[in-house]
């Protein structure tokens, strides 16, 4: 019963956090793409070089991993989810890469 | 202060705004400074609509064509009864100014609904009157986008008061403004759905969901209609996001998904920063001062239509693309100002809020004063060239009503109330050709006259340094 209650509580938290998890996943996917793809990020060529199917596959994988992590038994308390670190990492990577290619 | 006092006190600035904006935009037309795009088109379109022949034009795409093949805007019919009574170009300009300032009514009703004091209502009413993008937008002659400001605010008012049938009626009018108007309606609908509502406010969510769905469906229909029966939807304004020409707009979503850094670099381009300040300073940056993410949905049209595109007119306060997003920014300013909940950034800092509104009013005043100063030169031009203008109008009025004409762009609106009017570079044979001789109005008028001469046109009449009218030798006898 206790376990069930804990799971239910976690689900309640999850309901409020799913959007954040998705956004964090999106930012991490974009950071990976930035690091893997050759060329500057501030061009349409960068977009053209990334096949949409591969991108969506990567995004789905990362989001799935984040969701699994959220339900791991060691995550007894609600995970503190913040968009700030993933966004900062992404923007910093984009800035460095854009600077390199300018 | 009595509850009706703000409305009464705001009557004077509103009338002043109307007199100045309508008066000087009419003067701009009378000075022959309005061009084919867009006033010539709309003027001729109303001429055809008045005759019961539909929204036809000949000068928009160099041939007889319905304007709805370019933009789907049935809302134009709303002004037709007035135009029928006063069939002049000036009527359209006056009605446009009246439409834009009429948005003050739902805006004041909204401020009352949100519980603002009389002084605060007065302050926000002044904010509406001093919003520079509204006055500036009216000076690029007549445009359907002017309907957006009042209609967006009426939809929001009926949404806030939970009067869903009225809200849906105004939403239907909003959708009929243009094929991209569903963007505004869909964002309002989404905002209504996602905003946590009180238990008894279920109707608001249902209405919002309905609005969102209908807007999305209408958008698809409008784009399909224009692609199928018209010239095709104007997606070229978002060329900077279209990575695959074959996929069109769909590839724009890929760009946003895959490379948000690129999107940000396009939004915060140096030329857009001034525009961003011109739009946000007169509302004291209040629209962005909230932690309630649902409200940020109402910023989507501003970002999508004004900031993302590289089409220069879409990020200028002197063109018509700011009416809808300006109305949403004003509403957000009002909403965030009135918010007393713990999630409101300005919670408990009443003094700061009042200071922000005062700062907004000062910047609005400064920016509006700039527009007033910029546009006041029409008065000087008018007094300097009144006699000459009368001569030119008299000369052009002598052209037969049934004659087909091709003309330099700035004289098309004046000559537009006829069946056939084209731009000077048309391939259509016409009875007359009108060449603008004013310096800077027509590129190389001498060469143009020479070309027309070779085409068989001969001088019919002229006003020195202003206009030359040429006729084809065979057409003078015909008319």
Image (cartoon, rainbow, N blue to C red):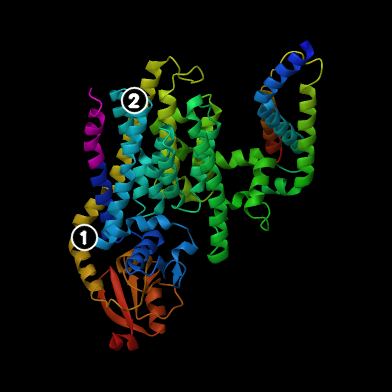
Q: Chain of mark 1?
A: B
Q: Mark 2 = which residue? A: B358
Q: Residues within 10 Å of mark 1 (few under 14, many from 20)?
A: few
Pick the quarter of the image with the C terminus of chain B: bottom left
Q: Tell me the distance, in whole angstroms, between the alpha carbons under discs 1 and 2.
A: 41 Å
10 Å crowding of disc 2: few (<14), some (14-19), many (20+):
some
Asked whether, in this view, residue B133 is left or right of residue A91, the answer is left
Task: State which chain disc 2 sits on.
Answer: B
Q: For residue B237, which numbered disc appears in the image?
A: none
Q: Which residue is mark 1?
A: B385
Rendering coords of residue B116 (x, y %): 34, 24
Task: Please give the name of the residue rendered at 66% of the width and 29% of the height, measured from the top-left corner.
Answer: A19
- Of the residues tagged 1 and 2, which is closer to the observer? 2
Vertical position of residue B40 compared to residue B357: above or below = below
- Residue B42 position by quadrant: bottom left
What residue is at 35 percent from the left and 81 percent from the top? Answer: B431
């Amino acid at each position: 019963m206790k376990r069930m209650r804990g799971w239910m509580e976690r689900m309640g938290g999850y309901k409020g956090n799913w959007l954040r998890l998705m956004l964090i996943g999106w930012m991490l996917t974009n950071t990976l793409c930035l690091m893997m793809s050759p060329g500057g990020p501030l061009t349409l060529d960068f977009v053209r070089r990334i096949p949409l199917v591969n991108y969506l596959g990567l995004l789905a994988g990362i989001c799935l991993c984040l969701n699994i992590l959220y339900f791991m038994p060691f995550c007894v308390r609600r995970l503190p989810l913040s968009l700030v670190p993933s966004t900062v990492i992404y923007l910093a990577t984009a800035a460095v890469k854009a600077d390199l290619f300018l | 202060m009595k509850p009706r006092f703000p409305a009464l006190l705001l009557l004077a600035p509103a009338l002043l705004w109307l007199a100045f904006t309508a008066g000087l935009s009419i003067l701009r037309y009378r000075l022959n400074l309005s061009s084919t795009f867009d006033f010539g088109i709309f003027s001729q379109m109303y001429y055809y609509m008045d005759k019961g022949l539909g929204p036809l034009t000949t000068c928009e795409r160099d041939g007889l064509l319905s304007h709805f093949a370019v933009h789907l805007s049935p809302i134009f019919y709303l002004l037709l009864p007035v135009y029928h009574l006063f069939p002049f170009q000036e009527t359209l300009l006056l009605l446009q100014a009246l439409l834009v300032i009429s948005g003050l009514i739902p805006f004041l009703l909204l401020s009352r609904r949100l519980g603002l004091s009389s002084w605060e209502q007065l302050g926000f009413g002044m904010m509406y009157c001093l919003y520079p993008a509204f006055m500036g937008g009216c000076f690029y002659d007549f445009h359907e986008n002017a309907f957006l400001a009042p209609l967006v605010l009426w939809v929001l008012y009926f949404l806030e008061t939970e009067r869903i049938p009225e809200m849906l009626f105004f939403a239907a009018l909003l959708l009929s403004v243009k094929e991209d108007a569903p963007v505004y309606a869909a964002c309002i609908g989404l905002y209504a759905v996602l905003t946590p509502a009180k238990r008894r406010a279920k109707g608001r969510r249902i209405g919002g969901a309905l609005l969102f769905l209908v807007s999305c469906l209408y958008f698809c229909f409008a784009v399909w209609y224009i692609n199928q029966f018209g010239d095709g939807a104007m997606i070229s304004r978002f060329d900077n996001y279209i990575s695959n020409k074959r996929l069109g707009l769909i590839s724009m979503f890929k760009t946003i998904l895959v490379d948000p850094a690129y999107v940000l670099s396009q939004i915060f381009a140096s030329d857009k920063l001034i525009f961003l300040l011109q739009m946000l300073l007169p509302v004291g940056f209040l629209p962005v001062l909230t932690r309630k993410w649902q409200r940020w949905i109402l910023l989507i049209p501003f970002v999508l239509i004004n900031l993302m595109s590289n089409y220069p007119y879409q990020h200028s306060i002197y063109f018509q693309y700011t009416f809808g997003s300006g109305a949403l920014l004003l509403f957000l300013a009002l909403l965030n100002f009135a918010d007393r909940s713990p999630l409101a950034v300005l919670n408990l800092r009443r003094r700061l809020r009042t200071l922000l509104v005062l700062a907004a009013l000062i910047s609005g005043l400064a920016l509006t004063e700039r527009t007033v100063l910029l546009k006041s030169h029409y008065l000087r031009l008018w007094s300097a060239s009144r006699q000459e203008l009368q001569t030119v109008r008299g000369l052009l009025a002598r052209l037969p009503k049934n004659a087909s004409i091709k003309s330099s762009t700035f004289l098309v609106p004046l000559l537009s109330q006829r069946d056939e009017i084209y731009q000077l570079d048309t391939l259509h044979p016409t009875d007359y050709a009108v060449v603008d001789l004013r310096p800077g109005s027509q590129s190389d008028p001498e060469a143009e006259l020479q070309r027309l001469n070779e085409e068989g046109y001969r001088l019919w009449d002229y006003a020195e340094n202003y206009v030359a009218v040429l006729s084809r030798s065979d057409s003078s006898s015909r008319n």
